[in-house]
Image (tube, helix red, strand yellow):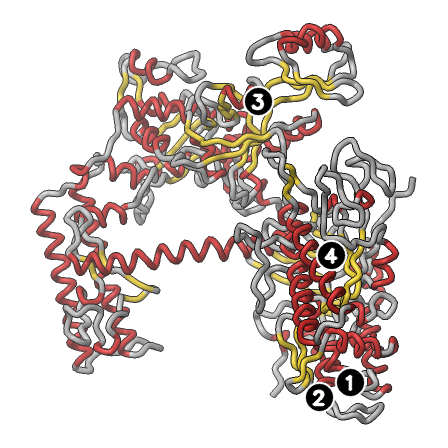
Amino acid sequence: MIPKRVSGIKFEVLGPKEIRKMSVVKIITPETYDDDGFPIEFGLMDPRLGVIDPGLKCRTCGGRAGECSGHFGHIELAAPVIHVGYAKLIARLLNGTCRECGRILMKDERRDRFIEMIEERKKLGREYDDIIKEVFRITKSTKKCPHCGTEQIEVKFEKPTFYYENEHRLTPRDVRERLEKIPDEDLPAFGMDPQAVRPEWMVLTVLPVPPVTVRPSIILETGQRSEDDLTHKLVDIIRINQRFMENKEAGAPQLILEDLWELLQYHVTTYLDNEVSGIPPARHRSGRPLKTLAQRLKGKEGRFRGSLSGKRVNFSARTVISPDPNLSINEVGVPQEIAEELTVPIYVTSKNIDEVREFILRDEHPKANYVIREDGRRIRIIESNRDELAEKLSPGWIVERQLMDGDIVLFNRQPSLHRMSIMAHYVRVLPYKTFRLNPAVCPPYNADFDGDEMNLHVPQSLEAQAEAKMLMAVQDHILSPRFGGPIIGGIHDHISGLYLLTRGEKLFNKAEVMEIVRPLEVTKLPEPKYDGKWSGKQIFSMILPDITIEFKAEICQNCEVCKGVECENDAYVYIKDGVLVTGTIDENAVGAFKGIIIDEIIRKFGSEEAKKFIDNMTKLAIRAIMYTGFTVGIDDIDIPDEARKQIEQVIKEAEERVWRLIDAYNQGNLEPMPGRSTEETLEMKIMQELGRARDMAGKIAGKYLGMENAAVIMAVSGARGSMLNLTQMVACIGQQSVRGERIRRGYTYTDRTLPHFKPGDLGPEARGFIRSSYKEGLNPIEFFFHAVGGREGLVDTAVRTSQSGYLQRRLINALQDLKVDYDGMVKEQTSGLLIQFRYGQDGIDPMKSFRGKGVDVKRIIREVKTEE
Amino acid sequence: MKVKLQDHILVPKHEILSEEEARELLETLGVKEEELPKIRVDDPIVKELGAKRGNIIRIIREDELVGVSIAYRLVV
């Protein structure tokens, strides 16, 4: 069979003829069901409109529920009404055509020129909206018809569906008559195709009634029928329509008829769109606004974004996550309860039939929940039919087995911003109610355990399972395509732990070593370095594969001349043939995003080995940190009085310098910096001075805290927090800022931030400098400025997330069908349009790059050197 | 005084392809002319080169990160 291809989609407007032609019944009565619960003929639930009750047959096509997709009916409107969706276009057409002869308000030659221009643009596949806009603009400003000479009166459009000509209201009938007069030849100039659309069709005379399948009624537990919102709205329309007709026939006064007409217009308008501005939305008896046609399509939960672009799935689970360092990074702990509900299909063959039968016969955890027979019938396995089904089981059946250890599943955390947000894990069924994961995989998911929830999906075919294993496994995503380095690695405790273990030459006796190494896959201890004792570096070396590498650790002080292996800080890591010779393991070595060792292992031995290393590393680190114990308390940020005094002194001096700057400014002696005003210069200098003061205070505090301090260990090793955080806790919080400037907002008319200061005070405390530390506490004025600065940060994050989210959505939509072809060129899949001649100009896969570079020259030199 | 755009350091080198070169290019790339990226005929650099509609322009860019990269544009 030749596959059918959609070459294009054309939208047209339904005309009254077409509406009647596709209708199977003319609806005339607002009643739906009779007292016995049967649908009334010629009512809104007419049996010819389709079936929703199972078992019944459609009166039009004979199909059952599910087979028959329903048939349209129609309502003959007693008087024409405006279609809200086209109200604006109608207004433009009324102003663009003559009120007498209906011709376009433009000479024929000019009209033809415009039509030609539009045709040309269409042929090139370009937009032509601007030309049409121009036509409407010109015709609207033409005051006299060039064809019949009639003076034109501007038609004023009032939302949602009213038109006025000098205070005189045009009825929909008037509007329709005018639109009817527009000749077909003039329409292309307005961008309309006379074959598809006649303008008068935009004023409704017949209303299509959607089939019952579109607006199914539901039966409540009480046995009462509850109708769909659309049905409710259609009932309103028919009722008013009926009343209008009766009144008209009885010869009611014009005033009453007009009121009814307006009411009919209201109902039809809200039926189409219940959120039009200018009229109150139609409401349900309970006061809830009705969900009518436009509301079904619009917005996040509408048909397009909610039902067509987004779908809900089976075989998935969601719960809270919690950490378990004893799991491998490619495992996920699944609660027993969830494992009993989720299933994996097994396709029964003559080869596995006995195995499968076992699952059916079992009555606890890894058992079979359902069987699907060859005819597609799905049967739940229960106590009573278990033996019978096991008996009947034959090749060709599908058995749905409960999830068990070793199954592959996809694990996901929203927002799914990059491909590492969904990775394949192997199942470990565990007790309790949370998903468990190794904390080393938190960075790619950006997860923490403060209540985060994650989703789990079970692939349902062998192909999907294979694909998950080959392409989505966690270890295949250790290297991030974002920057060509590892995104999975040690966090927090892992880094502190290894830092404590490997810093300097810590010694452990055999019992201690065994205790630390117990969970690792270590079978042989190396020769003890010192008389029956092992060093921490030796213990770490036990999990290292055979690599040779040297680099500067995170704790490196960036000395002017690097002493390399001789480093006094033990900050130069040298690993030779899988043995850590010098240096301390910290964030640069094993951390997520940095992890040079992980990077090296994955490049030399592949992802499987890297996975093993990370598993071992996390286990070792946690043992190591538990061996010494690690905690931070309030006394960790205590400093001696002498340090306190020094800090006090530093800040006082800085403040004095600031005051001197202010004096110089007031006397006009301040030399402005190039390109700056004196005011700007002063501000910059003050900021610099105070910033320096805080850094100095931090240095003093850091000196007195010492390298043994737990908070300092975390900061320098990169495990958590920074020296700045510590400075603020211990010494001085420093300048608060709004938009990068000192705080100056407040009482503008007296030019001061708070009433406690003199007008125009530029001094440090009047502009948000906080002398205190978090530990000392803030005085009320400092507290106020801190809240000001803090609020800006809060607002910033809120604004940034929403903006970058929308930006990413637009990018994804724009780039979704770009593909790197086999020849290395980036092309758009649908149009074949060339986007890049080589992917990224250099044709480099960033995931296989060395932190963005195509070639790692240093590595190659090292490899060549070792070969010699 | 008229400034030549090509003399500016931030403007990469542009040149018009001969018909022969153009045909060869399309053949090696295996794309149709209209699938190439486009550049408008009223683009300043196109005006300076004096290229006509349907010409193909070669742009030779030098970049610290990716080295020399070559791109082509169809004049429309």
Q: Which mark is residue A153?
A: 2
Secondary structure of residue under mark 4:
strand
Q: Nearer the viewer, residue A540 or A737?
A: A737
Residue at image location 15% in from the left, 64% down from the top: A655
| Camera-side mark, 3 or 2 | 2
Residue at image location 65% in from the left, 78% down from the top: A157
State whether residue A359 is above or below residue A625.
above
Q: Residue furthest right?
A: A1
Q: Which mark is residue A644?
A: none
Q: Are marks 2 and 1 in contact (CB under 8 Å)?
A: yes
Secondary structure of residue under mark 3:
helix
Q: Which residue is mark 1?
A: A99
Secondary structure of residue under mark 2:
loop
Q: Are marks 3 and 1 in contact (CB under 8 Å)?
A: no
Q: Which mark is residue A834?
A: 4
Q: Which residue is mark 3?
A: A341
Q: Nearer the viewer, residue A466 or A715?
A: A466
Residue A745 x %, y %: 28, 70
Chain holding disc 4: A
Q: Residues within 10 Å of mark 1 (few under 14, many from 20)?
A: many
The amino acid sitting under disc 4 is Leu
